[in-house]
Image (spheres, coloured by chain):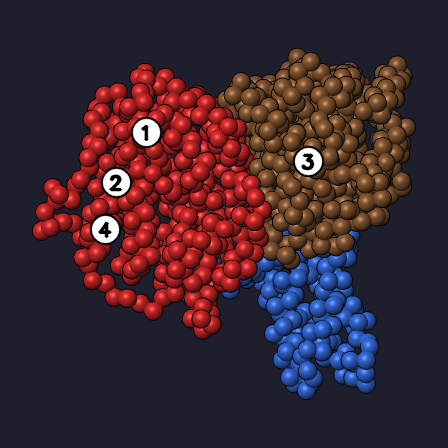
Chain colours: A blue, B red, C brown
């Protein structure tokens, strides 16, 4: 079948969306943007194609009355197994790479011992992977680097202790190797991996096998790919396959909410205010000026400074009872501002609430610069997931522009890629 | 409008009901903090037909506004308590804060009662703001007021008298009433008194800074630019008497002058921080307007000529005025430091303030040549972080104590 | 990057500039006097009456920017106590003094004999020469040109300038040069100025053609060169403009666009822009390339009006010599108030049939930049054409982010393209 793909190469994450020719979304994929944009694009695309397969399975299973009501569960099981197969494949790659990297003066005379430790570590990692992908297991991230990394630290350290070898030795090998593995384009044969996953799947194997195999047999043809996002110029695409993120965000927001007239996107490095016409065509836009104060990255610095996860900031800010006024959203001084406030005895949640308001105030200025807010208003980007930011935005929109419908899609992080995929369809179908 | 030219409030104010400094300062603070300008609105509403004319730093001939029967309203930005949304939409990150907050005040209708605006020459940012105001508020009479950079009475003076005439005529059109020479002379007399009292307060502070903290003097001056001059004159007299009468502890602070703060104002917290860090501010150029002219303006002869002469011959040296002779650059600052017996100078400028920052190396060099210790830092009207300021000012104070 | 391809007129101009630098740096041998002064409000004809050589510090800063020297000069000035916030023309100039004060011809700049502080349209000029005066201790002549706050010049402003010319500038220049002022000499120079101005206006107005045979911004900075610098009022300037006209005419006849530094003639013009604000000089060629690579040609610009708005009809007038110098100073682009600038730019968008207004906002230059976001909004409103905004600096290489600028330019061009398609579909 014909697949139309949009890839949004952002500064923090890379997103891909697969669409069919009727503009239906088939799959979405996301990965961390690495130093290697080609790989990030390839991984996100593959993830979106994996998701597309799952969509096709879902469609196929809809025709099997016996599994009715349990399709979600079955697919989750299948995906879990698929992820494990994929994870083990990458783990093997990582092990091979690590072993090759055991060389040089710092290992002199200890090569065998280090390799033994590595092999033992990876054996335990493989063993542990079953638990990692067990039903109901919570993984804090699906990115290989995060999954492999935290276990490697724990298990590797224990193995080293037993073997009487300094952990820093193998940590050094790991650090070097993970970058190589991460930047290697993903191995192909997605279908093969699904078949292996199918073998390990436990639920209704008999009923499921035929429809899944049939769905896997449908070829996914990459009919047209459009790249967008801050890193788009680095994509190995011909120029006509590249669209600015402004156009893609505008169109993506229109696809999610056709009534959209104003779009706000707060991304890692920039904030955009976009006005679109009734057919999703961009009429006007403004981005933050050269200074990136108040963009998503600002929250990243604050999270680092507070030693918290990015997603934990919003909930903590919501607990505030007395918002602190913060006048500067300068990324460079984020840490200093925070320490200054803490030194004054102000509470973390109150400071955070003030920081969230400061970011949204800045976004409000960009919206004002772009011509204000019209009904409907769609908020996208990573910060749209942050409840404290959303709360301030709702308040300020109401104060400044009255009753405006505010749309926030849980999948809003894919807005740019969705717009890209739509452009891909239009490039071919029209 | 009736003008009380005598203005001798102390006589009618028995000592037992004399307000304490705290009371006066509190009143000034509420005026200063009120970003809705309720007092000026009330003034306007009190008598039908009254007009309010706003003016920005650094100097405007308030006598003319007063003589036109209007209330001159000093607009010095939004301070650190206002959230700026629309104002930021008009300016890049490398432009100072004062035009942003001023636009915000306008866009949020906090200045919707202001009938006229005067944008004196300070720099290109305020200059351009004058044109923006014409577009944003087409029904407001607005005027860019360019003072001469040639100080020859026959050249700059002649030009300036004509500009003053144009300003007078503009105000006349706004109010529908011609300003007579006598009106103007009466206003000049009141402002002469105001300037005398302001100088007296500054001299008092230089004499006994522990009795007149700068955070109080600052509020007293800022509030004075938001009320009728007659009232401010009474307030100044009352403050002087109250401050003199009050006993306050003297601290082991060093005496400093603050320069570079004539346009965008530091937050009150910054002014307080300097004192907390061990500095008595005994001289400054905060909101310069009422100290811009240094001597009485003559009430004899042609009043416009008199205003022009005062500007040409008796006005302060500041960054937006050309200094015709190289050897005179910074002379005023050194003389003022000596007069106020300041031990050092804090050159505190708003970020991105072209006038103050371009002047800084020249003024600081002259201070250095005169053996006057100095430090420099930048602020914004909404600066929140005071720790670095306290640290720098504290270290400066300590170093002066150590070396003198 | 290969060497930039230059047209014959550009080479001619290069020679003229080299000759002027030679005249400046050889002043101790020739005994000629040198004045430093500014491009807006440049009184070249008057200086010529006294045989004084004209040295323009903005042009020196531009030269140093294009030669990649300005970065180290700016840092030198900042080390000396200058703020990172202020104008980099000033800092490049001051830093250059700190690093040997070498002119583009490799010879040291001699000290100027006079600073002619022609104070037009830019606050910083006043401080710039106060700073230079501190260094050189030479006579400094202030010519204060009032700002057209209400959108027009007044008789009072004009009289004030003429009086300053009579009372301050002319006696000052007589004293420095030892030459008596001869108003007929001035008249003659003004006559030549007006001729060159006529040529310049013709050239700039060719931007109205499709395809445009000129680039009115990147190419425009060359076209304005002689008139904005030390050649207004000379026969050399007229010769230059005659050569330039021939080149432009030849391109018109051949239906060609301007010559790009890569050597091609830029005929496939997809987007026509009006640009507001000075260019960036440190990455001039890279910046230009971002435009022609995407098919964007600049058909009109405000930067080519900083040294006089001849296209609005002003000509130096030999019959009213001092008055016409006053009118010239008053009418420079940055001495006009914001509503006037908006009207001028909106008129350009319409008369040059541009796709929109692009603002290159310069960190150094508040005179240009403060209020540009409002200019954009208003021009959009008046013309119905979308505007765009990018940020760079004059000569501070730290402030040129190629990726950032390119991203915004591409987004802008694609938006124009998409709107066109939308409009075509609707039609």
Q: Which residue sits at x=57%, y=31%?
A: C144
Q: Residues within 10 Å of mark 1 (few under 14, many from 20)?
A: few
User: Label 1 vs label 3: CA separation?
Assistant: 39 Å
Q: What is the number of the mark on residue A258? A: none
**Residue at image location 81% in from the left, 85% down from the top:** A109
Query: Nearer the observer, disc 4 or disc 1?
Result: 1
The crowding category of the residue bearing disc 4, from other C-alpha atoms within 10 Å (few below 14, some 14 to 19, many at least 20), is some
Q: Nearer the viewer, residue B26 or A85?
A: B26
* Distance CA(mark 4)–CA(mark 1): 30 Å
Front one among A430 and C163: C163
Q: Which residue is mark 2?
A: B232
- First reached walking from the N terminus: tag 4 or tag 1: 4
In the rendered image, residue A413, in percent from the top left (x then y), is placed at 58, 44
Secondary structure of residue under mark 4 = helix
Q: Which residue is labeled 1 in the image?
A: B300
Residue that numbered label 4 is attached to: B240
Disc 4 and disc 3: Cα gap in Å?
A: 54 Å
Give the image location of residue C383, x and y in percent: 60, 18
Q: CA distance from mark 4 to mark 2?
A: 12 Å
Residue at figure coordinates x 62%, y 36% from the top left: C141
Report how many numbered discs are placed on residues in the image.
4
- Looking at the rendered image, the disc whose residue lies closer to the viewer, 3 or 2, is 3
> What element does badge 3 sit on?
helix
Using the rendered image, report if marks 4 and 2 lie on a common chain.
yes
Q: Would you call the spot at circle 3 few (<14 residues within 10 Å), some (14-19), or many (20 or more)?
A: few
- Foreground residue among A25 and C180: C180
Locate residue C179, reporting x and y percent: 74, 31
Disc on res. C175 = 3
The chain carrying label 1 is B
């Amino acid at each position: 079948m014909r697949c139309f793909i949009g890839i949004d190469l952002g500064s923090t994450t890379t997103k891909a969306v697969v669409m069919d020719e009727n503009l239906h979304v088939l799959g979405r994929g996301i990965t961390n943007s690495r130093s290697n944009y080609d790989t990030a694009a390839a991984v996100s695309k593959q993830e979106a194609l994996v998701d597309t397969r799952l969509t096709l399975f879902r469609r196929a299973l809809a025709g099997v009355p016996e599994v009715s009501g349990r399709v979600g569960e079955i697919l989750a099981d299948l995906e879990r197994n698929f992820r494990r197969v994929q994870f083990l494949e990458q783990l093997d790659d990582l092990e091979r790479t690590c072993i090759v990297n055991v060389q040089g003066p710092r290992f002199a005379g200890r090569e065998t011992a280090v390799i033994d430790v590595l092999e033992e570590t990876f054996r335990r990692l493989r063993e542990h992977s079953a638990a990692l992908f067990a039903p109901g297991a919570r993984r804090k991230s699906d990115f290989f680097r995060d999954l492999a990394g935290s276990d490697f630290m724990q298990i590797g350290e224990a193995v080293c202790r037993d073997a009487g070898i300094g952990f820093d030795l193998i940590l050094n090998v790991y650090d070097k190797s993970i970058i190589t593995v991460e930047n290697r384009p993903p191995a192909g044969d997605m279908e093969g991996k699904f078949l292996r996953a199918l073998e390990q799947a436990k639920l209704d194997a008999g009923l499921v096998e035929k429809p899944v195999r049939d769905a896997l047999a449908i070829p996914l043809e990459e009919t047209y790919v459009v790249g967008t996002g801050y890193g788009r110029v680095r994509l190995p695409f011909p120029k006509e396959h590249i669209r600015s993120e402004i156009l893609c965000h505008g169109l993506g927001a229109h696809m999610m909410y056709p009534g959209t007239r104003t779009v706000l996107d707060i991304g890692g490095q920039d904030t955009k205010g976009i006005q679109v016409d009734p057919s999703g065509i961009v009429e006007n836009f403004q981005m933050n000026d050269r200074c990136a104060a108040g963009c998503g990255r600002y929250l990243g610095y604050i999270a680092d400074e507070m030693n918290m996860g990015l997603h934990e900031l919003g909930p903590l800010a919501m607990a505030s009872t007395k918002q602190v006024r913060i006048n500067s959203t300068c990324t460079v001084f984020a840490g200093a501002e925070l320490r200054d406030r803490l030194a004054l005895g102000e509470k973390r949640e109150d400071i955070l609430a003030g920081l969230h308001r400061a970011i949204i105030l800045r976004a409000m200025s960009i919206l004002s610069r772009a011509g204000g807010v019209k009904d409907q208003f769609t908020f996208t980007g990573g910060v749209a997931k942050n409840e404290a930011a959303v709360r301030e935005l709702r308040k300020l929109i109401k104060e400044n522009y009255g009753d405006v419908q505010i749309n926030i899609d849980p999948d809003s992080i894919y807005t740019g890629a969705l717009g890209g995929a739509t452009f891909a369809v239009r490039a071919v179908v029209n | 409008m009736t003008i009380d030219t005598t203005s001798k409030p102390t006589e009618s104010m028995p000592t037992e009901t004399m307000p304490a400094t705290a009371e006066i300062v509190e009143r000034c603070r509420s005026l200063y903090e009120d970003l809705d300008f309720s007092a000026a609105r009330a003034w306007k509403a009190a008598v039908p037909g009254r007009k309010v004319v706003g003016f920005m730093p650094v100097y405007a001939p308030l006598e003319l506004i007063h003589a036109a029967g209007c209330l001159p309203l000093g607009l010095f930005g939004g301070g650190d308590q206002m959230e700026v949304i629309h104002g930021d939409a008009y300016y890049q990150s490398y432009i100072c804060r004062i035009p942003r907050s001023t636009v915000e005040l306008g866009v949020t209708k906090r200045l919707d009662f202001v009938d006229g605006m005067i944008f004196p020459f300070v720099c290109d940012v305020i200059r351009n703001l004058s044109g923006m105001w014409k577009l944003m508020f087409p029904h407001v009479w607005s005027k860019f007021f360019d003072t001469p950079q040639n100080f020859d009475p026959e050249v700059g003076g002649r030009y300036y008298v004509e500009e003053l005439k144009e300003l007078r005529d503009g105000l006349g059109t706004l109010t529908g009433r011609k300003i007579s020479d006598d009106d103007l002379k009466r206003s000049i007399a009141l402002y002469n008194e105001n300037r005398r009292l302001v100088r007296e307060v500054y001299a008092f502070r230089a004499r006994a800074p522990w009795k007149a903290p700068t955070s109080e003097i600052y509020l007293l001056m800022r509030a004075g630019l938001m009320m009728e001059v007659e009232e401010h004159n009474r307030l100044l007299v009352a403050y002087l008497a109250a401050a003199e009468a009050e006993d306050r502890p003297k601290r082991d602070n060093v005496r400093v002058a603050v320069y570079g703060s004539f346009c965008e104002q530091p937050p009150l917290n910054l002014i307080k921080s300097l004192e907390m860090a061990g500095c008595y501010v005994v001289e400054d150029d905060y909101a310069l307007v009422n100290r811009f002219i240094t001597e009485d303006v003559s009430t004899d002869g042609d009043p416009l000529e008199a205003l022009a002469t005062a500007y040409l011959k008796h006005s302060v040296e500041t960054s937006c005025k050309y200094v015709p002779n190289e050897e005179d650059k910074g002379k005023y600052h050194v003389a003022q430091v000596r007069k106020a017996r300041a031990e050092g100078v804090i050159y505190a400028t708003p970020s991105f303030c072209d006038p103050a920052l371009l002047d800084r190396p020249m003024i600081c060099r002259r201070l250095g040549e005169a053996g006057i210790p100095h430090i420099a830092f930048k602020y914004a009207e909404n600066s929140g972080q005071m720790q670095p300021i306290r640290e720098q000012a504290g270290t400066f104070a300590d170093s002066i104590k150590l070396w003198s | 990057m290969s060497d930039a391809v230059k047209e014959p007129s550009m080479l001619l101009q290069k020679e003229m500039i080299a000759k002027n630098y030679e005249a400046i740096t050889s002043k101790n041998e020739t005994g000629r006097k040198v004045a430093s002064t500014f491009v807006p409000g440049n009184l070249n004809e008057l200086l010529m009456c006294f045989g004084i050589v004209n040295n323009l510090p903005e042009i020196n800063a531009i030269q140093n920017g294009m030669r990649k020297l300005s970065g180290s000069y700016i840092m030198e000035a900042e080390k000396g106590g200058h703020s990172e916030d202020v104008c980099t023309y000033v800092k490049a100039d001051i830093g250059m003094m700190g690093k040997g004060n070498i002119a583009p011809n490799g010879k040291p700049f001699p000290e100027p004999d006079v600073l002619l502080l022609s104070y037009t349209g830019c606050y910083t000029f006043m401080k710039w020469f106060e700073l230079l005066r501190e260094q050189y201790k030479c006579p400094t002549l202030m010519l204060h040109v009032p700002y057209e706050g209400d959108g027009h010049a007044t008789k009072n402003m004009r009289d004030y300038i003429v009086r300053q010319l009579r009372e301050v500038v002319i006696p000052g220049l007589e004293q420095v040069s030892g030459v008596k002022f001869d108003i007929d000499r001035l008249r003659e120079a003004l006559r030549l100025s007006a001729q060159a101005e006529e040529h310049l206006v013709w050239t700039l107005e060719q931007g109205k053609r499709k395809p445009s045979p000129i680039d009115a911004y990147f190419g425009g900075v060359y076209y304005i060169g002689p008139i904005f610098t030390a050649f207004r009022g000379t026969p050399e300037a007229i010769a230059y403009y005659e050569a330039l006209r021939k080149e432009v005419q030849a391109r018109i006849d051949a239906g060609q666009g301007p010559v790009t530094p890569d050597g091609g003639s830029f005929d496939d013009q997809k987007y026509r822009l009006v640009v507001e604000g000075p260019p960036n000089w440190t990455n001039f060629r890279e910046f230009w390339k971002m435009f022609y690579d995407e098919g964007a040609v600049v058909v009109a610009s405000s930067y080519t009006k900083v040294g006089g708005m001849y296209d609005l009809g002003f000509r130096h007038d030999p019959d009213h010599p001092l008055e016409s110098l006053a009118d010239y100073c008053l009418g420079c682009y940055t001495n006009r108030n914001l509503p006037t600038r908006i009207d001028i730019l909106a008129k350009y968008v319409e008369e040059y049939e541009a796709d929109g207004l692009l603002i290159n906002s310069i960190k150094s230059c508040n005179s240009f930049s403060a209020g540009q976001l409002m200019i954009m909004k208003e021009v959009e409103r008046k013309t119905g054409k979308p505007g765009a905004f990018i940020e760079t600096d004059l000569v501070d290489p730290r402030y040129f982010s190629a990726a950032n600028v390119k991203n915004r330019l591409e987004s802008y061009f694609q938006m124009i393209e998409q709107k066109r398609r939308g409009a075509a579909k609707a039609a």
